[in-house]
Every structure is written in structure tokens, then in C-alpha cells.
Image: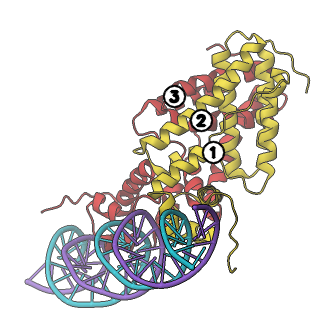
Chain colours: A yellow, B red, C cyan, D purple
Amino acid sequence: MASVQKKPDMKERILETADKLFYLQGIRAIGVDTIAAEVGISKRTLYNHFPSKDALISAYLGRRFVQPGSSDKPPAEQILGTFDRLERGFASKGFRGCPFVNAVAELGAEDKSVKKIAVAFKESRRLWFRDLLNQLGVADPEGLATQLALLVDGSIAQNLVRDDPAMARAAREAARVLLKNAGVTVSG
Amino acid sequence: MASVQKKPDMKERILETADKLFYLQGIRAIGVDTIAAEVGISKRTLYNHFPSKDALISAYLGRRFVQPGSSDKPPAEQILGTFDRLERGFASKGFRGCPFVNAVAELGAEDKSVKKIAVAFKESRRLWFRDLLNQLGVADPEGLATQLALLVDGSIAQNLVRDDPAMARAAREAARVLLKNAGVTVSG
DNA sequence: TTTAGATTACACAGACCTGTGTAATTGGGC
DNA sequence: GCCCAATTACACAGGTCTGTGTAATCTAAA
């Protein structure tokens, strides 16, 4: 056996590789030939699983769209924990910004479907913040949730160009101040 | 005379068009033929002024790099005014995120020179904030300047995907809270 | 062992891209 | 009127890209 034939779905194997390459090098920068070669399959097989590169891009973004999980930790801790996770992500070698923002940036304004999923992702995170803030009983959960979302995306964008995980700590500190101002006492 | 021959520098005319197309549609999405056609010149003329597309990209980003001007308005007003300008920018039809972040996103990690100018731009804005905060005598001008920069980039990224100028107002409100927390009293 | 479906190699069409070569043409300054 | 530099039209090389067509081969199940 010249090539290793593993069991997991071919579709999933393709998506894993597409994710890695699209995210690290850019959607426009990577051709389907490159993806097929990296998976170790023929281009024909790739096109047997995805009718077009656009379909592959959509599947890539869909796979990146993971709903934030629920936890029984204190809400304030969950909120600040978001920035701790960000910091760890920034420190890891493979971090290269928000895949949704990047996709919108490189695919242009005309691509409605990509923008749609990007908006849905941003909104889902904002709502996750809002629900936690509701549990904390703050005065304006909607507004504060938006502000926290800004800090998340700001630190991601800054880190994309600066490669400096300290951006996450700065965002966390700002979030702590915003929470305190809303009457939420935070330990860490 | 079939085509209109205006006086201003050909180089500048090319750059204006390249700016518009690169920014609105993406650097990778626009070819030099498209730019030359839009300017109304031959591709050969374009290459007589810029040795390569890369040089054109660099010139495009260099032209976007405008140092924030100095003003004699009160520092706190200048800081918050940044977000008012952002809001007006977001509301204008041609807004499509930060050209430097977008360029880093689509040109990939390997492009050192693009990343360099992007970092310089981000840092220049952060230093502009820091100097104003120094005038205000806050305790930690460096840290607070970073946090304000995060809010700026966060609102830009959010607006890129959401097309909602309210993101700038949210960032402004968050900035106001951060300033207040640092002992700066703000009217508006 | 037979069979059906997945996968392969490989060529190719058609489009687009960057960059160059070249000879003709324009237009402003002397 | 003449000259020189800029600009033009246009073809082309060489590369990349997406997507398809086809016939051979492999593999796992019946």
C-alpha cells in the first residue's frame, strides 16, 4: 500500500486539509490542486465530494462555526475566560486572525453568502455574551455585549498584524473595567 | 482626442484607481489589466511607472498610511472624536474594513513587507492615543492606548462584516467608560 | 468470484494572471 | 517644423486557476 488509506470520511479529510490551508494561507491563495495533493488524493476525487471550490469554501466556514458551549462556571468568569482562551490561541503558532473576517476581506463585498455566515457567527458570540450579562443582571446587556464583542475582534485583528498575545491581555483588562463599571465585581 | 488626458501625475492617477479597486474588491481579486483599463491607459504605461504589481501594492499601502494630524482641541475630545470619524466612515458606502488588516489577511503570513507596514500603522495610531493620554495625565497611558486601539480595530472588523455604523458608537461608549475609569472626565 | 462504487491518472479546455517586446503614434517644448 | 519622451496597440510567453472527460484500477461487500 503506497498511500495510507484511513477510514474517516473522505469528505472530512478534505475539509480538514482545506481548513488548514485556507486559514493559514488564504482562500484565494490556495487552489484545489494544492488541497488534493496535500490530502493525497486526485483532484477528481475532491470534485466528487464538492461540486465547486465555492462549495468547499462554504463547508470550510460552516465547520468553523462552532457555537460557544455552555458552562456552569460563574458568568463573569466565563466572560473573562474568553480572553484567556484568546491569549492561548494567539500564542499558538497557527493563529492567523478570524477566519470569517478574513474571508469577507478577501472575497469582497459582492459575496453575500460568506458575509451572511460571518454575521451569524459574530452575532452568536455577541448573544452568548448577552445571555451571561443577563445572568449578572447588568443594566444594558445588549450594549455591553456589543462592546465585549468589539474587544474580542479588536484583539484578534491586532494580533493578526502584531503577533503579540499581549493584545488579549489588554482586551481582558478593558473587559474587566467595563464589567466593573456595570456593577459586576470581578476577582481576577 | 479619444481619451481624456488630464494633467495630474500619471503615477498618482494610477494609484488613485489602484486604491479604489484594491480596497473595494481585494488585492488578489484585481489584476493590473483591470487597473490600467479603469485608468484608461495601456498596461505598458502602468508598468512604466511601477515595476511590478508588488510595487503597486506597496505604494497603495504607503499612500493609505497617513499619520494622524495634531489638533489643539482637548485631548479627550480628540480621542472620542476618533470614534465619531469612524462612525461617519462606516456610514459611507465605500467602507470595507482596514486596508492593512485586509492586506495581511489576504496576502498571507509569508509577506513580511506588508506585515511591517501594517504593524507600523497600528503602532502609529496607538502612539497617537498614548500621547494624548499622557497630556491627560492618566496612570497607564501605554496600556490604555492599547485598549483604545483594540476598540478601534474591533469596531472596524465588526463593521466590515455587519455594515452597522452603530459599532462605532458602541466603541465610543466603551472608550468613554475606560477614560472615566482612568480619571478622565468626559462631557459628551 | 463477481460486481458496483469509489478512486485513480492524465489530458485538456478555457479563462485569467503577471510581465515583456516592439514598432507606431502622439504631443509639448525648442 | 522638429525632436524627444511618453504613451499606445498588440502580440505573446509562461504560469496558474477551476472544472470536466475518460478509461483504467482498486476495494469491499454479496
Q: Identify the mark at residue A64; answer none if there is no mark.
A: 1
Q: Identify the mark at residue A178; answer none if there is no mark.
A: none
Q: Amino acid at mark 2?
A: Phe
Labels 3 and 2 within one chain = no
In space, the residues marked 3 and 2 are separated at their CA atoms by 22 Å
In space, the residues marked 3 and 1 are separated at their CA atoms by 30 Å
Name the subunit of mark 2.
A
Q: Amino acid at mark 3?
A: Glu
Q: Identify the mark at residue A121; answer none if there is no mark.
A: 2
Give the vertical position of B111 relative to A12 (above or below).
below
As rendered, which of B60 and A42 lies closer to the eye? A42
Q: Amino acid at mark 1?
A: Arg
Name the subunit of mark 3.
B
Judging by the rendered image, the residue that carries numbered circle 3 is: B87
Locate residue A49, reporting x and y percent: 51, 59
- Could you tell me if the residues under marks 1 and 2 are in contact, i.e. CB atoms within 8 Å? yes
As rendered, which of A68 and C30 lies closer to the eye? A68
- Quadrant location of the N terminus of chain A in the rendered image: bottom right
Labels 3 and 1 within one chain = no
Q: Is residue B59 visible?
A: yes
Q: Helix or strand or loop: what does disc 1 sit on? A: helix
Nearest to the eye among marks 3 and 1: give it: 1
- Quadrant location of the C terminus of chain A in the rendered image: top right
Please give the name of the residue rendered at 65% of the width and 13% of the height, measured from the top-left corner. B187
Q: Earlier in the sequence, mark 1 or mark 2?
A: 1
